[in-house]
Image (cartoon, rainbow, N blue to C red):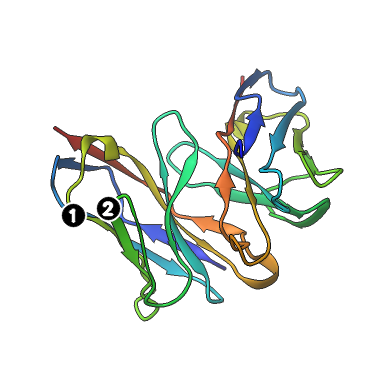
Amino acid sequence: DTGVSQDPRHKITKRGQNVTFRCDPISEHNRLYWYRQTLGQGPEFLTYFQNEAQLEKSRLLSDRFSAERPKGSFSTLEIQRTEQGDSAMYLCASSPTGTSGGVDTQYFGPGTRLTVL
Amino acid sequence: GNSVTQMEGPVTLSEEAFLTINCTYTATGYPSLFWYVQYPGEGLQLLLKATKADDKGSNKGFEATYRKETTSFHLEKGSVQVSDSAVYFCALSERGTNAGKSTFGDGTTLTVKP
């Protein structure tokens, strides 16, 4: 079990550019979550997947944000036309389903820190 | 909607002092409750959890009890160490269809001095 991994760990971009982040969950986990964390705040829910199906999107996720999990394994989060307000840490988490671990226990990746200049 | 309120920090303690970080929540259903810890430069790590009323979660000397009547989940440790310095987040997670979707508090920064 290698844990949840995210790539890149840091991204600096200019306003107006598009960026894409990747998350690789723990292999047997069916659920995958994206959160955003700004300085001094707790993580805020963005969206989550059950296998390849995107089940919910937060109102925080504007039309410039899109997430996919095409084969029910890794996921990507794309931000188009980035704005300075998008600067934050983007966290990915995964959780198992079934009775062994409980679907509500999440395991977090190290995050991708985005800086928009 | 759901919300989590943590005591404001930062909290600074001397080594071996007693720690309490207060957490209260508002939830539409019957959530699971969690404490996560974030060490400098690292991701969130699950510290402990409780899934039903009166359950006590414990790990690494930390404890928290699910108090449904007061909607609280306060974190305690009897004797803190310098290595406990970190940011602590209280969180709740929904059950049912949205199981796993979590709401976090804003975090409490703990600094333990030798």
Q: Quadrant of the C terminus of chain B?
A: top left
Tag 2, which chain?
A: B
Residue at figure coordinates x 69%, y 54% from the top left: A59
* Above or below, comparing residue B27 to residue B6 in the picture: below
Q: Position of residue A86 (x, y in %)?
A: 63, 34
Q: Residue furthest right?
A: A70
* Above or below, comparing residue B38 to residue A52 in the picture: above
Residue at figure coordinates x 17%, y 49% from the top left: B79
Q: Nearer the viewer, residue A34 or A38?
A: A34
Q: Would you name the residue on which mark 1 appears?
A: B78
Q: Position of residue A44 (x, y in %)?
A: 57, 49
Q: Based on the displayed image, in which of its 4 quarters is residue B68 positioned?
A: bottom left
Are tags 1 and 2 found on a single chain?
A: yes
Crowd around label 1: few <14 · some 14–19 · many ≥20 (10 Å)? few
Tag 1, which chain?
A: B
Residue type, mark 1 in image: Gly
Q: Secondary structure at mark 1?
A: loop
Q: Nearer the viewer, residue A61 or A21?
A: A21
Q: Would you name the residue on which mark 2 appears?
A: B61
